[in-house]
Image: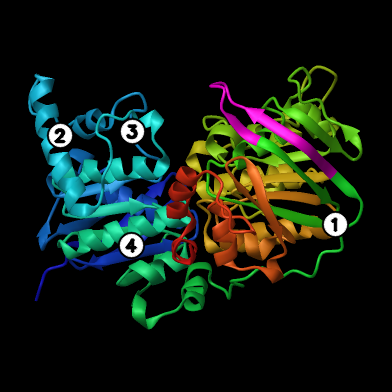
Amino acid sequence: MTAPAIELKGISKAFGPVQANKDISIRVMPGTIHGIIGENGAGKSTLMSILYGFYKADAGEIWINGQRTEIPDSQAAIGAGIGMVFQHFKLVENFTVLENIVLGAEDSALLMPSLSRARRELKALAEEYELSVDPDARIEDIGVGMQQRVEILKALYRGADILILDEPTGVLTPAEADHLFRILEGLKREGKTIILITHKLREIMEITDTVSVMRRGEMTATVKTSETDPAELAELMVGRKVLLRVDKAPATPGATILQVRDLHVTDDKGVERIKGISFDIRAGEILGIAGVAGNGQSELLEVLGGYEVARGEVLMNGEPIDLSGSKSDGRSRRRRGIAHVPEDRQREGLIMDFAAWENVAFGYHDDPGYQSNALLMDNSAIRADTARKMERFDVRPPNPALAAKNFSGGNQQKIVVAREIERNPDLLLVGQPTRGVDIGAIEFIHQQIVALRDQGKAILLVSVELDEIMSLSDRIAVMFDGRIMGERLPSETDAKELGLLMAGITDTGRAHGVGEVEENLAHAGGDAAKEV
């Protein structure tokens, strides 16, 4: 019989009192795509970090291709033919693609021969695996989809036969994710072994041959993907039945909360990112903004959140908001009843080295409940409030003193969502609310957003997940190239029509900016491209 490409036997790992992995055993056969799923904090990334040499297991054995193998560090893992693409990329942003590929794998002290060889091999790898990327482009100038290709090329350049991908689609659009899957299928055909860590059941069902389920640091099941279904996997992950759709009553909109009129935003390079958009949001409704990333949605959230200057008119509860920059800040927005869950929790929502309780206080440190007197904050009160929020939002581990960087991505998101929703805002701005979040947490966050709507609050939702937009929104506006191309009711549209609008095709069939339309069609998805 063929030996497993990877076999882990009795792996255990603890971080202080937290048992991240407990007596885990798993076998991954060569030339297959093996999925590992579980809630945030289930121990998936810890297990793979042990395999890659980032952590050393407290107990257990690692076997590679039938041989027991010691992996004390990542260099040993690379030597054993293992490559890993992390959820948050390990790239030097001001280096070129080629320099990042070579970094740490130079042939000698003379860099030029290494770069020349890498350029040749990079071209061959790119052609073989559909991983084309400009070798001379700087990382800071290319999108996240391209950056992920660079990470995969780095691993292949170092001779990886086993490739671990940790939440690889967390920062990708649906179409970029589909292209990644085609790349993985190509790697599989070439005999590579793929381990895919994800929380997205659609991806598991679409791409994997076998799936292992983890819950609270233990392995609960390993099944053939063809012999299971999303409902069963969700229950194995969470330990209970999970509603795989958003359960909400029809909206009952009230008074207009937010009015946006002829809004323009120009970036620091003089490029107009938002081109005269107008819309309203009423109390008790969710307006979803659909669109391929980079078409003005981020700038819209930044303007309304208070850290981007704009031209035009924005009214909150009938009163104008200053967009000139003099009073355009987050504090004034919060005082006007605007809460903001930003798109990038690590860059904009949290200070990663600070404790959870400190992050919960950010932006709200002048709250009377957080003050011991006119000059000092009551840290004990903040810690107690953070503990209550952690319990209500099921943040794991529920430790207010733990630094934000030590929580999994989904639990980091829960901290941000709890901080903003618990402030009972009139308007919630929420960007990519479930990016990198597991199925149980997705269900919970969606419930909280709908509950806020049902309390008569207005919600502006930005998401690249079209399923999320269609299931949560009461109205959907589609943005392309800084403009709103159309507005739809979820009950009266479908993914194909929205995909066309996302690609710049209007109701009349007229295309805006042919070059941009061609580029965006590739991102909008197969149905839209076929329709055009």
Left or right relative to 474: residue 409: left
Please rate how many residues cluster around mark 4, counting C-alpha atoms within 10 Å: few if below 14, some from 14 to 19, many from 20: some
What's the mark number on residue 455? 1
Measured Cα–Cα span from mark 4 to mark 1:
45 Å
What's the mark number on residue 23? 4
**Which is in the foreground here, disc 2 or disc 1?**
2
Give the labeled residue for mark 3: 91
Q: Is residue 261 magenta?
A: yes
Is the C-beta separation of discs 3 and 4 under 8 Å?
no
Give the labeled residue for mark 2: 119
Left or right relative to 226: residue 189: left
The kind of residue tagged 1 is: Gln
Q: Nearer the viewer, residue 77 or 192?
A: 192
Q: Position of residue 315 (x, y in %)?
A: 85, 36
Q: Secondary structure at mark 1?
A: loop
The kind of residue tagged 2 is: Arg
